[in-house]
Image (cartoon, rainbow, N blue to C red):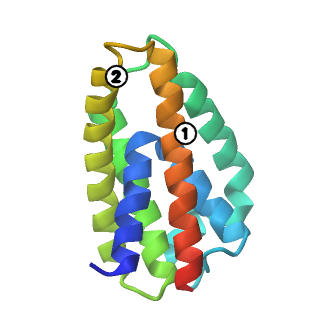
């Protein structure tokens, strides 16, 4: 598998865990010039000018995830938003490397779907022995850490 495809899947998995966090990380990577914007129309969606608004949404998402009335990530609307976020981020990551954005979108969307299911399963398993809040914090750390790793790898691809 090509490195760029793995990055699209990886950022998609992050979107499956925390969709706005993935968008914020891609926007931050573009602003830091860790990844090039290139001519990708998808990179414009998360271009650094929107970073502050996206970051605000990501922080809100991290808070809302811990609330007891937050719907399951596998409900239709939350799952669709995770897949859409993964597709946008995957296309942006793929498009910046002068690769076909549609491939990145498909791989990012699939990664988000897999990340959402895996995150749900792991959270259910860990909730048996830990508080939901502690498990959610671990998931936050995994999403942010995994996204940063994807950005660092993307920067080395350039």
Q: Quadrant of the N terminus?
A: bottom left
Q: Is residue 153 above or below residue 61?
A: below
Helix, strand or loop status at disc 1:
helix
Helix, strand or loop status at disc 2:
helix
Can residue 37 be seen from the camera position used here?
A: yes
Residue found at the very far front of the displayed protein: 129
Question: Residue 113: which disc?
Answer: none
Q: What residue sits 53% from the left and 74% below the top? A: 154
Can residue 75 be seen from the camera position used here?
A: no
Residue 153 position in % (x across, y down): 52, 72
Q: Is residue 118 above or below residue 86?
A: above
Q: What residue sits 56% from the left and 32% below the top? A: 61
Question: Residue 141: which disc?
Answer: 1
Q: CA distance from mark 1 to mark 2?
A: 15 Å
- For marks 1 and 2, the one nearer the N-term is 2
The residue that disc 2 covers is 126
Residue 113 position in % (x across, y down): 27, 48
Number of labelled discs? 2
């Amino acid at each position: 598998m090509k490195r760029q495809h793995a990055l699209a899947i990886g950022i998609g998995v992050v979107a499956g865990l925390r969709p706005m966090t993935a968008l914020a990380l891609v926007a931050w990577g573009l602003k830091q010039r860790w990844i090039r914007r290139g001519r990708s129309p998808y990179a414009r969606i998360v271009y650094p000018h929107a970073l502050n608004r996206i970051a605000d949404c990501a922080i809100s998402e991290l808070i809302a995830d811990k609330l007891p009335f937050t719907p399951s990530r596998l409900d239709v609307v939350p799952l669709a938003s995770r897949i859409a976020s993964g597709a946008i981020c995957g296309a942006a990551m793929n498009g910046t490397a002068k690769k076909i954005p549609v491939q990145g979108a498909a791989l990012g969307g699939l990664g988000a779907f897999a990340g959402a299911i895996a995150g749900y399963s792991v959270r259910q398993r860990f909730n048996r022995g830990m508080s939901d809040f502690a498990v959610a914090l671990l998931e936050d750390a995994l999403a942010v850490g995994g996204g940063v790793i994807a950005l660092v790898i993307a920067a080395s691809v350039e």
